[in-house]
């Protein structure tokens, strides 16, 4: 999909897909590409899409539309084109329709054989040899090679220094360190252009010596203006002799002896400037001829470094903008999803309240009870939603205390009994009577089991004779505690199984928040365990919640350091799956009981 | 001999809504007022019920399945035209805004009292003077 990506301006990071045949660009809300930039006209331009071509058309805007720095009225966009409207810079990316077939048609890999080309290898060089290409012996024979090596090394190290960082301040710091390593500057500063005001804002300053307050770096505005306007680096070895600075005479006033100021010219425009100098305070300026510390070579090098630095700044800004855009999209999705659920719950509460109101008006207790049930149900829903949100949002360690897994699971079964009955689903509870006291977070496990059991009941709603079986199991030899929740409901298709633990993925439509299973999985993982699921569509699903069984046996094997926790000990006498004792609460479906 | 009142059909409403709570509230309140109701959880299921029972008013929640699909919308519109049924839509949709008067579109979250009043008004307009 062709798109325009904002890389500079208030809307930095936004990506606009060009889906429609006409896409408006402007400040007004009616534009598909709405830019919050006061220098953009209300209806500034439009992108017309016709037969695979995207034509940018200026709509008589006050400040004009620019493509690759050229003002245009109409322009057919190509991938990589830079579109400037007001202070906003966008990059156009077209439809990439070059297939590998196209490329294959242009390249032939000739197989060995009689028809092969007659090329032969006449020379080869290993990587090691390549590294020594500028060996000292070679260099002493050629000053050009020595310079070339030196410059190449600088550029190579600059490229390395500016890669792999996402922090612009850190990036600029590295650049300045490199400059100080290679150039005999006393002080240096990197300034980035503020995209809104156009001003150069100092971002990094470095001094070779300790700087006294009276020696603050004062940069001549004349130099800055020249560099920014002409986009060329300047070297001044003695400002008073350089006729370009005579009118302003600011350098003389500032006492700068030698300075290099280079533009940071990137792919998309000026990013900033790098300024270095050797500084002598005005009172100490030596009248005699002095040896220049900066040369033309230094200037060339600084221009090259400035360009590299600008590219890196652009890449870092671009990447940061992408990350920011993704974050915003994720936050937006989260808010939208949660708002939707809250809205549904609110609707339920309003409905219940309305019934209560009607019941009070007509003294109809049935109506009041019905209304209250709806309010109560929705109150429970919002409570669950909030608890799930809190559980999911926090990284935490489970608060392990000695607890009975059967008790916790039994509470869930009891709590869900009404819901199961309403849905005509029978809920069976099979606790393992040999379950020892374990160390776990009972509140968290309660939540994890509740979500899974609730899903199982929902999955059986459309099944005649729906049945959910909840069981616990203590697997002593593997030191595991297990809760299984099995249903004979609609089941989950194989392609959806992978997604069920993803946030906000729900197969329950507006009833599901898409938070339940991710939360349950998180809780089990916090306990060092996990959830496994097997499912067959139209047959049912089995969810297994497992976590390491840490038993509370202080008198048998206390841990070193006085700890009370021990790993589960030897297995109890032969206890297989068939030992599960079905106890109580095996209720028939409600329709059979009535 | 049949009485004159036998010729007047019993007021009827089809509720198409995935929310069990919303269906229950409307069903309870309308039935208390002597209105016959049918319920569907999906838009397509609602079309089928409408064709079978020809309700006088259809309350359609746009979250109910594919309610916003052109085909489904056309089917509801056709049912509404052929059998003089009033369609009341819950939720925002430009396509329904083009075919329905504003007072028959309710944004969510909504209050039930105005919805019930709208339904009553529509039913009484069908019942005649």
Image (cartoon, helix red, strand yellow):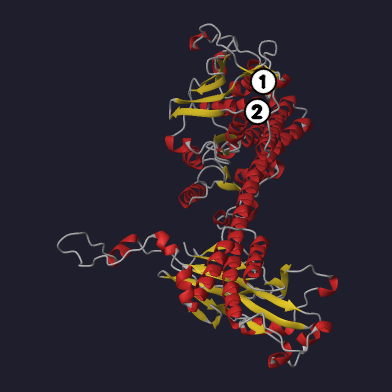
Chain under numbered label 1: A
Percent of width and height locating residue A116: 19, 64
Tag 2 secondary structure: helix
Q: How far is mark 1 from mark 2, CA to CA? A: 16 Å
Q: Earlier in the sequence, mark 1 or mark 2?
A: 1
Q: Residue at x 69, y 37 (%)?
A: A390
Q: Nearest the camera: A377 or A312?
A: A312
Quarter-of-image position of residue A232: bottom right
Identify which residue is drawn at 49% across, 28% down.
A533
Mark yes or no: residue B11 visible.
no
Q: Tell me residue B109's x, y (percent).
A: 68, 45
Considering the numbered disc 1 on the image, is that residue within a helix, a strand or a loop? Answer: strand
Crowding around mark 1 (Cα neighbors within 10 Å: few <14, some 14 to 19, many 20+) is: many
Q: Which mark is residue A439?
A: 1
Q: Nearer the viewer, residue A592 or A496?
A: A496
View extreme (top): residue: A573
Q: Residues within 10 Å of mark 2 (few under 14, many from 20)?
A: many
Is B118 situated above or below A78?
above
Say whether residue A394 is visible. Answer: yes
Quadrant (top left/top right/bottom left/bottom right) for the C terminus of chain A: top right
For the point 55% across and 42% down, the residue is B64
Q: Which mark is residue A447?
A: 2
User: In the drawing, does residue A501 fall left or right of residue A131?
Assistant: right
Left or right of A300? Residue A293 is right
Height in image: A46 above or below A406? below
Disc number at residue A418? none
């Amino acid at each position: 999909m062709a798109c325009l990506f904002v890389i500079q301006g208030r809307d930095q990071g936004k990506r606009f897909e060009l889906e429609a045949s006409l896409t408006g660009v402007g400040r007004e809300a009616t534009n598909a590409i709405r830019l919050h930039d006061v220098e953009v006209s209300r209806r500034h331009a439009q992108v017309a899409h016709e037969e695979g071509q995207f034509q940018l058309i200026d709509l008589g805007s006050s400040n004009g539309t620019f493509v690759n720095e050229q003002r245009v009225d109409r322009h057919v966009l190509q991938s990589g084109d830079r579109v400037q409207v007001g202070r906003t810079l966008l990059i156009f990316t077209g439809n990439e329709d070059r297939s590998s077939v196209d490329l294959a048609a242009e390249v032939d890999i000739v197989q060995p054989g009689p028809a092969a080309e007659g090329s032969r290898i006449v020379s080869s060089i290993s990587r090691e040899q390549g590294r020594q290409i500028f060996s000292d012996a070679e260099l002493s024979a050629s000053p050009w090679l020595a310079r070339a090596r030196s410059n190449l090394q600088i550029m190579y190290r600059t490229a390395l220094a500016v890669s792999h960082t996402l922090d612009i301040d850190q990036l600029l710091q590295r650049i300045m360190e490199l400059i100080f390593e290679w150039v005999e500057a006393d002080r240096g500063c990197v300034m980035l252009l503020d995209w809104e005001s156009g001003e150069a804002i100092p971002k990094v300053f470095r001094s070779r010596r300790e700087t006294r307050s009276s020696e603050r770096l004062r940069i001549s505005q004349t130099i800055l203006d020249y560099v920014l306007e002409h986009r060329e680096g300047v070297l001044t070895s003695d400002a008073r002799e350089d006729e370009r600075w005579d009118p302003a005479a600011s350098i003389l006033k500032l006492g700068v002896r030698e300075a290099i100021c280079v533009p940071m010219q990137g792919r998309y425009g000026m990013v900033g400037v790098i300024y270095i100098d050797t500084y002598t305070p005005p009172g100490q300026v030596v009248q005699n001829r002095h040896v220049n510390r900066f040369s033309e070579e230094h200037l060339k090098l600084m221009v090259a470094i400035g360009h590299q630095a600008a590219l890196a700044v652009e890449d870092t800004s671009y990447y940061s903008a992408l990350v920011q855009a993704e974050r915003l999209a994720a936050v937006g999705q989260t808010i939208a999803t949660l708002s939707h659920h809250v809205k549904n719950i609110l609707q339920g509460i309003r409905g219940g309240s309305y019934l209560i109101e009607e019941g009070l008006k007509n003294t109809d207790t049935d109506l009041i009870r019905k209304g209250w049930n709806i309010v109560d149900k929705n109150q429970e829903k919002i409570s669950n939603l909030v608890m799930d949100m809190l559980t999911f949002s926090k990284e935490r360690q489970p608060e392990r205390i000695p607890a009975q897994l059967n008790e916790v699971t039994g509470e869930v079964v009891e709590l869900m009994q009404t819901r199961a009955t309403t849905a005509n689903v029978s809920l069976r509870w099979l606790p393992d009577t040999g379950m020892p006291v374990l160390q776990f977070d009972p509140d968290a496990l309660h939540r994890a089991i509740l979500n899974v059991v609730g899903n199982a009941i929902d999955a059986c709603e459309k099944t005649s004779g729906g049945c959910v079986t909840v069981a616990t199991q203590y697997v002593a030899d593997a030191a595991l505690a297990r809760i299984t929740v099995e249903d004979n409901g609609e089941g989950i298709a194989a392609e959806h199984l992978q997604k069920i633990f993803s946030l906000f993925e729900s197969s329950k439509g507006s009833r599901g928040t898409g938070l339940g299973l991710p939360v349950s999985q998180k809780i089990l993982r916090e306990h060092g365990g996990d959830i496994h699921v097997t499912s067959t569509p139209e047959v049912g699903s089995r969810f297994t919640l497992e976590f390491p069984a840490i038993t509370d046996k202080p008198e048998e094997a206390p841990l070193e350091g006085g700890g009370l926790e021990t790993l589960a000990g030897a297995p109890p006498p032969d206890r297989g799956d068939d030992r599960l004792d079905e106890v109580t609460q095996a209720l028939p479906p409600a329709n059979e009981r009535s | 001999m049949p009485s004159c009142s036998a010729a007047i059909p019993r007021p009827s409403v089809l509720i198409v809504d995935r929310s069990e709570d919303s269906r229950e509230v409307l069903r309870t309140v309308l039935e208390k007022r002597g209105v016959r109701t049918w319920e569907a959880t999906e838009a397509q299921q609602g079309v089928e019920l409408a064709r079978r029972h020809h309700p006088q008013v259809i309350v359609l929640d746009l979250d109910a399945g594919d309610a916003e699909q052109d085909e489904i919308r056309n089917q509801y519109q056709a049912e509404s035209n052929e059998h003089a049924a009033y369609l009341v839509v819950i939720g925002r949709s430009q396509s329904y805004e083009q075919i329905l008067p504003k007072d028959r579109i309710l944004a969510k979250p909504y209050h039930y009292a105005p919805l019930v009043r709208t339904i009553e008004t529509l039913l009484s307009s069908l019942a005649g003077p």
